[in-house]
Amino acid sequence: SWTTGNVIEEQVAAIREQVGTKRAICGLSGGVDSAVAAALVQKAIGSQLTCVYVDHGLMRKGETEQVEKDFVAATGVQLKVVDAQERFLDALAGVSDPEEKRKIIGREFIRVFEQAQAEIIVEAAEGEDVAFLVQGTLYPDVVESGGGTGTANIKSHHNVGGLPEDLEFELVEPLRKLFKDEVRMVGQELGLPEEIVQRQPFPGPGLGIRIVGEVTKERLDLLREADAIAREELTAAGLDRDIWQCPVVLLADVRSVGVQGDGRTYGHPIVLRPVSSEDAMTADWSRLPYDVLAKISTRITNEVADVNRVVLDVTSKPPGTIEWE
Ligand code: XMP
């Protein structure tokens, strides 16, 4: 019968069998899938695994620390953190178009990740074969992509000496038979932090696509504060499990007049986008209790400098998407 204990035992055996004495790399995104995949592989092969976390500076408050500290403490995994915040900010400077931002973030991410992979290969001891790449592919992804498994072939532009032209990895995908809720159960059983196991969906491009307008350090810091307040209050109200996710968006190019203390303000609006959904393909806006919305609004306008208005997005999907960009 299906139990998380059985799944873990079975996968640990399968991973050991597949990897043998070779080495594996796993990219962590801060999300539940890559975290659970990494934890399973760690349980199976321990120090033969190295995880890579690219800090692109577009994460929400506390998320990078969750990976660097809590995840490492829970699993004992060997982690290589690449601080690429400056690089992403430089690449995004002057760019407002959503698709352009997505392309830049995706491109920079691959470059930084491949560089890290190349460094791990170079750092490996003589005779050690870094042959595997761990991915958090779930059952729905397998079905969607036609079921094939395979290899990741990565073109070399690493500027690291002594590497083959192409880096070729065989994939390790320990979550291929699981649905999301099962992945969460496995993660919990493996002792991963609650914040990671229960995390709601968060886009790869992160806060970069939740700033309508150019992405700057100041705007990211501002949005991180507003987002942290919204999440805190939703959690305090016990609404985490009721909503699918709640993007918090900064309209960086919009200003409106307000009044605070004895003076006129001219600040930015923050948009709350709470949605309910089954699979993110369609969504409805969540009818959150007014008192929770009021609390979030009061706190954001009081605590976040330069924000003087909080607005609620009451659009379903379609016609709106969940994210604003
Ligand atoms: P939209 O905005 O298209 O979003 O209604 C649907 C779901 O996908 C998430 N999303 C992303 N996830 N990389 C991701 O991993 C992305 O580039 C990306 N864009 C949107 C979004 O948060 C929602 O859950």
Image (cartoon, grey):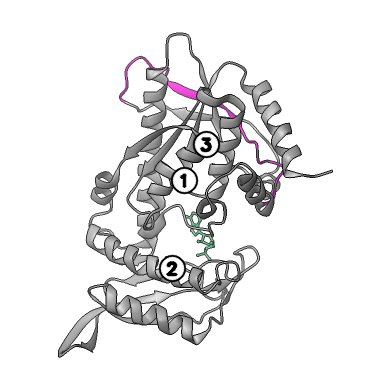
Q: Can residue 285 be seen in this view?
A: yes
Residue ID at (55%, 71%): 238
Mark 1 CB near ligand 1 (8 Å cut): yes
Q: Is residue 28 visible?
A: no
Q: Residue 85 in the image: state x and y as whole percent.
A: 28, 47
Residue ID at (37%, 49%): 105
Type of residue at label 2?
Glu
Compare marks 2 and 3 and give the one earlier in the sequence.
Answer: 3
Identify the disc placed on residue 187: none
Q: Is residue 107 left or right of residue 239?
A: left
Which residue does the numbered mark 1 point to in the structure image? 29
Describe the element under mark 2 as helix, strand or loop.
Answer: helix
Compare marks 1 and 3 and give the one earlier in the sequence.
Answer: 1
Type of residue at label 1?
Ser
In-front residue for pair 109/235: 235
Question: Mark 2 and mark 3: span between their CA atoms?
Answer: 26 Å
Which quadrant is the C terminus positioned in? bottom left
Question: Mark 1 and mark 3: span between their CA atoms?
Answer: 16 Å
Q: Residue 233 in the image: state x and y as whole percent.
A: 45, 72
Residue ID at (52%, 49%): 193
Residue ID at (34%, 27%): 158
Q: Residues within 10 Å of mark 3 (few under 14, many from 20)?
A: some
Please say if the residues under marks 2 and 3 sit with CB atoms less than 8 Å apart: no
Which residue does the numbered mark 2 point to in the structure image? 232
Which residue does the numbered mark 3 point to in the structure image? 75
Q: Nearer the viewer, mark 1 or mark 3?
A: 3
Q: What stretch is highlighted in magenta?
A: 159-179
Q: Nearer the viewer, mark 2 or mark 1?
A: 2
Q: Residue 169 in the image: state x and y as whole percent.
A: 54, 25
- Residue 80, quarter of the rendered image: top left
Residue 284 highlighted magenta (yes or no):
no
